[in-house]
Image: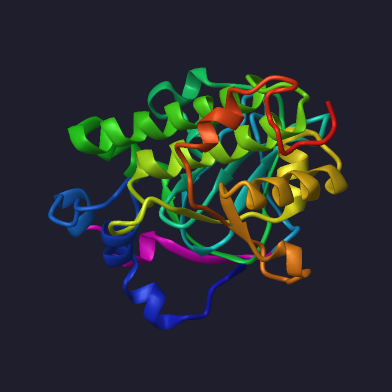
Amino acid sequence: MAKAKSPSLASKTIEILTTQSFLFGGLGQDPLLSDLAPDRLTVEKLYSNRPVYTAFRPQIWQEHLYVVVNGGPIIMRSTPLDRVIALTYPGGCFGMRSLPVGVGAATRAFPSLVEAYKTTNVIKVPVQVVQDLYDQNEMFRQRYTLLLELREKFQYHLLNCSTYPPQAVAAVLRGLIFQERSLGGQPQGSKTEYRFDLPIDLIARACQLNHRTVEQVLKGLTKAGYIKTDKLAESANDLVKVIDPEGLKEVYGATRDKVSWWPLK
């Protein structure tokens, strides 16, 4: 980890927080933010494949909440199965369950590694600022509680899927769709499509399938008209675009023999 050198980003941290993040959006007039000295907020660049911290260590709490500005995603990997159990994209936050704020103190789990899957710019907000806003601002408190709820629901999507590959991959996509829709980040405009920087490796580690199987499922979802992806052209682009999120519900709820495009029963 290294502190970002961009002076423009460092000088506009509060503006970025209140215009680009779900949690702090529209709170620019709150005295707790408007009177906050910008140097209390740290702008940092997180590099890929480097640990940020280990969540849920016994009796150990983090000192900051992390707000994702751009890049990413940020992932959390469970121990010992090395399964991806959380993904955070720009506009979102991570670290809530490692802060003694609200019900975060009750949402403890086994130690899990948090890392940037790709280079990510974040703003670190001190825990005391988060606590003060939580105590004094009703809107912030509701949003903070929702973020904790979304973490639990994303894991529920993963736990609620079977080993049937189409359903397992659809569970990851449905979990991300629900998360982004709840945060208001997607869909944008009149289109009902969702775009994710989602490498095959992340999908495989989230639903516990091998990479080849995930590739075949993505091909099937593409041919069936649920998604668009550049992976078929062996591109380095990891974009997955869900163009039929409602139709994807059928795959998510499918059991064996109910997905016609999947050849293996």
Residue 104: tell me if it is visible.
yes
- The answer to whether residue 109 is magenta is no
* Residue 52 or residue 73, whichever sits in front: 73
226 is higher (above) or lower (below) than 123: above
The quadrant of the rendering that contains the C terminus is top right
91 is higher (above) or lower (below) than 208: below
44 is higher (above) or lower (below) than 226: below
Q: Residue at x 26, y 58 (%)?
A: 18
Q: Residue at x 58, y 44 (%)?
A: 87
Residue 80 spot, x, y in % from top left: 83, 29
186 is higher (above) or lower (below) than 55: below
Residue 100 spot, x, y in % from top left: 46, 29
Q: How is the image coloured?
A: rainbow
Residue 117 spot, x, y in % from top left: 68, 56
**Is residue 216 found left or right of 58 in the rendered image?**
right
Q: Residue at x 46, y 47 (%)?
A: 93
The quadrant of the rendering that contains the N terminus is bottom right
**Is residue 5 found left or right of 109 in the rendered image?**
left
- The answer to whether residue 46 is magenta is yes
Residue 128: tell me if it is visible.
no
* Residue 264 or residue 184, whichever sits in front: 264
Figure label count: 0
Q: Residue furthest front?
A: 260
**Is residue 156 found left or right of 17 in the rendered image?**
right
Residue 103 spot, x, y in % from top left: 42, 21
Q: Dividing the picture into quarters, in which one does residue 86 lie?
A: top right
Q: State which region is magenta.
A: 35-47
